Amino acid sequence: MEKIDILSFDLNELSLFLEELKQPRFRAKQIFKWLHSGVENFDQMTDIPKSFRELLKEKCYIATAEIIKKYVSKIDGTVKYVYKLYDGEYIESVLMKYKHGYTVCISTQVGCRMGCSFCASGIDGLFRNLTPSEMLAQILKAETDNDIRVSNVVMMGMGEPLDNFDNSVKFLKLVSSDNGINIGLRHISLSTSGVVSGIKKLAEYNFPITLSISLHAPFDTIRNDMMKVNKSWNISELLDACKEYQKVTTRRISFEYALIEGVNDSDECADKLSQILKGIMCHVNLIPANPVKENSFKKPNLAKIHAFQKRLTYNGLNATVRRTLGADIDASCGQLRRKAKEV
Ligand code: SAH
Ligand code: SF4
């Protein structure tokens, strides 16, 4: 019999499940709270009768993220984790400390099938989707390992969250549940490479999260070479979906733009970017591209990056260069997992 993934249940589902097992009503909240406090086995639930804990063990499992590697930055305390999942797969998470609190960057898939040319996560394709509980476990582990409370989450690790739509949505509901870790949706960002069908579906939920679009180029010719997804939905279709999304949610959209020397860092790109984003309430995050071992691209020098930003600002766009955290433990998205697996 396949065991039940109990940490992926919302409170309602857990109540129904416990009802079937003839448990009193208050039990659901009690167990939900235990699960979301980071316990990794049922025996840690000390106020649950032992016989019932045994029954739970028989029927269910608690998803966990086991620390395999941990790199701590000596510069700013950023922690990069490689976690092992129940089936031996590896994923990555990053814990960052900002003035306003702790942010965790979580993975949503093992690998990724989007195949962006500059990204290490997609090199070996997609292995599998993460369950909502495995997304949650990354935050719980960061909290228990450091004895802290996490206040912000970014879905920007390995994987494309909108290619794992239902589990990502369920995760958003669980992580913001007031009986759980209760991180407000306003403190969560979801980053997508531009899966337009997913953006449209997400708009229907009207979550007050921040939608982050990995745009990276203002011309289809350039974006086609960088991101396969642009061949399914081009820039104009993507921006139309963003406008629709914004109409519904009234939330500011964040555009990610990884600067690669000689590819997307020209004045012409800056001007075109300013032009196509007109009319969208947004913020542009400029990211100096992280070198990937398997690739040969380079980031522009700092002067060039700041010139690009200035040009956007001059054109009326709200643009900043993203601060690099954990520079001494640097490895771009997907690289730590490859290193840990020695592929
Ligand atoms: N799949 C989603 C979220 C995970 S990737 C997405 O693509 O948006 C998180 C961010 O890292 C994306 O903006 C992605 O474009 C960026 N990224 C990936 N590889 C990078 C690299 N080598 N340098 C800089 N940014 C990179
Ligand atoms: Fe996947 Fe995002 Fe990497 Fe593209 S950038 S391969 S969508 S994880």
Image (cartoon, grey):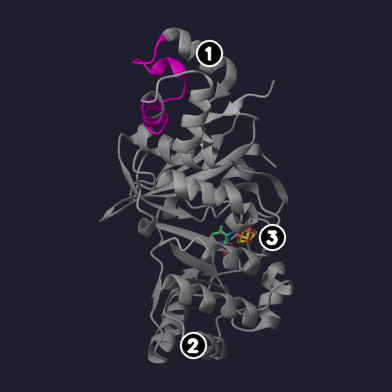
Q: Nearer the viewer, mark 1 or mark 3?
A: 1
**Quarter-of-image position of residue 250:** bottom left
Which residue in the structure is indicated by mark 3? 114
Is 336 rendered above or below residue 57?
below
Range drawn in magenta? 29-49
Q: Which residue matches tag 2?
A: 274
Residue reaching furthest left? 99
Q: Position of residue 171 (x, y in %)?
A: 50, 46
How many neighbours does mark 2 have within 10 angstroms: few (below 14), some (14-19), or many (20 or more)?
many
Return the disc, 2 or 1, that comes first in the chain's sequence.
1
Residue 242 in view of the camera: yes
Helix, strand or loop under label 2: helix
Res 55 label: 1
Nearest-to-viewer mark from 2 and 1: 1
Q: Position of residue 32 (x, y in %)?
A: 41, 31
Drawn side of residue 316 relative to residue 124, left or right: left
Q: Nearer the viewer, residue 162 or 338?
A: 162
Q: Disc 1 marks which amino acid?
A: Leu
Q: Earlier in the sequence, mark 1 or mark 3?
A: 1
Q: How far apart are the two marked residues, 1 and 3, measured between alpha carbons?
A: 41 Å
Can I make out residue 62 in this image?
A: no
- Under tag 3, what secondary structure? loop
Q: Give the amino acid type for the residue marked by disc 2 in the picture.
A: Ser
User: How many angstroms separate mark 2 from mark 3 (CA)?
Assistant: 26 Å
Look at the image and say whether residue 269 sits in the magenta stretch. no
**Mark 3 within 8 Å of ligand 2, using the beta carbon:** yes
